[in-house]
Image (spheres, grey):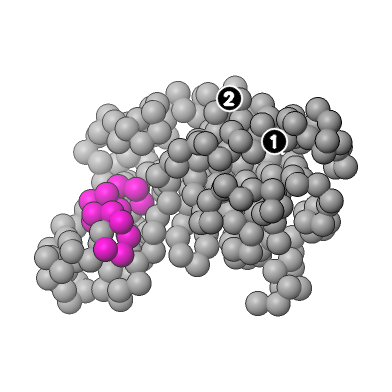
Amino acid sequence: MTVANRTKGIDPRVVELQTVPRPVAAFAVDYPNGHVIPWHSHPRAQLIHATRGVMTVGTGDATWVVPPHRALWMPAGVEHTIRASGQLALRTLYINSDAAPDLPAACRVITVTPLLLQLILRAIDLPTLYDANGPEGRLVQVMMDEIARLPEAPLNLPAPTDPRLKRVADALIVAPGDSRSLAAWGRAVGASERTLARLFPIETGLSFRQWRERARLMHALSRLADGEAVTSVALDLGYDSPSAFTAMFRRALGAPPSRYFAAAAS
């Protein structure tokens, strides 16, 4: 893909920020529900965060669903696309890779602590050409240190490459509430249950059950951000009851859906 194509359809302000002579450039923009940022990449690494709404971020290798209180670290040069669920308040950082030698070389979701959130919001308010050697530069360095030390949050959905696994994964992405057993999926794609069970962790790092549950969680996050009721989402995703869905949601994100989205809106 050419450099021109990498920035086609991208806000020209974002393009300009890639050459700012500062280690970090911060940017704030709001998008409506359903807005899609087309495939593109940046010369700088990026911390993609939204204070409101849910982002679905796709790369060639995986899909991430990023709710409030989480952010996606995107290394420089990685092609990606973003879709908004709910009103999206994007608060993102563009980071010179030379200024971030300790940060990951691959995409990962991190938890946004209250401290990191305030640092991001403060960085948004800094002048573009902030004093890199003064208090503003020290604030940016504290923010970088905070990003580097945060643990990964498991909100990615790795894409398998084996054709049989890919057929299963593609079907579950479209219909994550499909509750067929792995044996039934094996019959559908021409593989034994044992073969599929062996290949899922090899290709995705997750068992079939874990992969399907994560696909359901990510699908649920987008629908809940759109304002759908927990009960309808839970039943559509194959859970026996809203309480079973809520238990899964709490295990993954630390709070039930109502409290999680209420905290994000506050």
Disc number lying in front (2 or 1): 1
User: From the image, which quarter does the N terminus lie in?
Assistant: bottom right
The answer to whether the residue labelled 2 contacts the one labelled 1, judged by CB atoms less than 8 Å apart, is no
In the depicted structure, whether residue 118 falls above or below residue 9: above
Magenta range: 202-215
Position of 43 relative to 230 (above/below): below
Residue at screen point 53% across, 24% down: 263
Identified by mark 1, the residue type is Gln
Image-based side of 24 in relation to 80, left or right: right
Residue at numbered disc 1: 141
Determine whether 115 is above or below 28 in the image. above
The image shows residue 83 at horizontal and vertical percentages of 58, 53
What is the CA distance from the residue labelled 2 to the residue labelled 1? 17 Å
SS for callout 2: helix
Q: Identify the amino acid type marked 2.
A: Pro
Q: Where is residue 256, by image quadrant?
A: top left
Which mark, residue 114?
A: 2
